[in-house]
Amino acid sequence: MGWSLLFEPQNKEVAQKLGIATALMFTVPITVFYFCLTFVFHEKEDPEMWAGLTAVVTVNLVIAGYVYSAFSEEDEFTTTSEGDAAGPRVGAFKQRTD
C-alpha cells in the first residue's frame, strides 16, 4: 500500500515534488560542504566545522523550501459556505438561542 499511493495519477505532482526535494537534500549539502571546505574556509582553524555548519544551513533551507511549496499548493477542498451547511457550530462559534 505505501509506495503504490505515490504512483497514482492524482499524486503525480506530490511524488515529483518529494523526489526533487529528496535529491536536493542529498546532493546540495554535500556539494556545499566540499565547496566551502576547499575554497571558502580552507584558511580557517577548523574548516570542517564551518563547512559542516554551511551544509546544515543548506539542509534547513531545502526543508523550508519544501514546506513553503507544500503549503502554497492550492487546496482542492475549499469550504466557502456559511452557517449550518458546513457543519454544526461548536465552542466559541456556537450562537446562543436563549
Image (cartoon, rainbow, N blue to C red):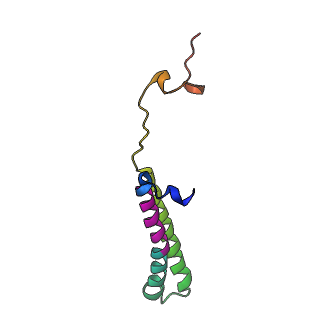
Q: Is residue 21 magenta?
A: yes
Q: Nearer the viewer, residue 47 or 79?
A: 79
Horizontally, residue 24 falls left or right of residue 89, namely left
Q: Nearer the viewer, residue 52 or 77?
A: 77
Q: Is residue 59 above or below residue 36?
A: above
Q: Position of residue 11 (x, y in %)?
A: 44, 54
Q: In what quadrant of the picture does the C terminus appear? A: top right
Question: At 41% from the left edge and 42% from the top edge, which residue is drawn?
Answer: 76
Q: Position of residue 44 (x, y in %)?
A: 51, 87
Q: In what quadrant of the picture does the N terminus appear? A: bottom right
Q: How many marks?
A: 0
Quadrant of the rendered structure where residue 79 is? Answer: top left
Q: Is residue 8 above or below residue 22?
A: above
Q: Nearer the viewer, residue 89 or 55?
A: 89
Residue furthest to the top in view is: 98
Horizontally, residue 6 falls left or right of residue 98, namely left
Horizontally, residue 38 falls left or right of residue 94, namely left
Q: Is residue 19 magenta?
A: yes
Question: At 57% from the left edge and 26% from the top edge, which residue is drawn?
Answer: 92
Q: Nearer the viewer, residue 15 or 92?
A: 15
Q: Is residue 21 above or below residue 69?
A: below
Q: Is residue 70 above or below residue 78?
A: below
The magenta segment is 13-26
Q: Position of residue 88 (x, y in %)?
A: 55, 24
Q: Position of residue 65 (x, y in %)?
A: 44, 61
The dominant secondary structure in magenta is helix
Question: At 40% from the left edge and 56% from the top edge, which residue is drawn?
Answer: 13
Question: At 46% from the left edge and 82% from the top edge, which residue is drawn?
Answer: 36
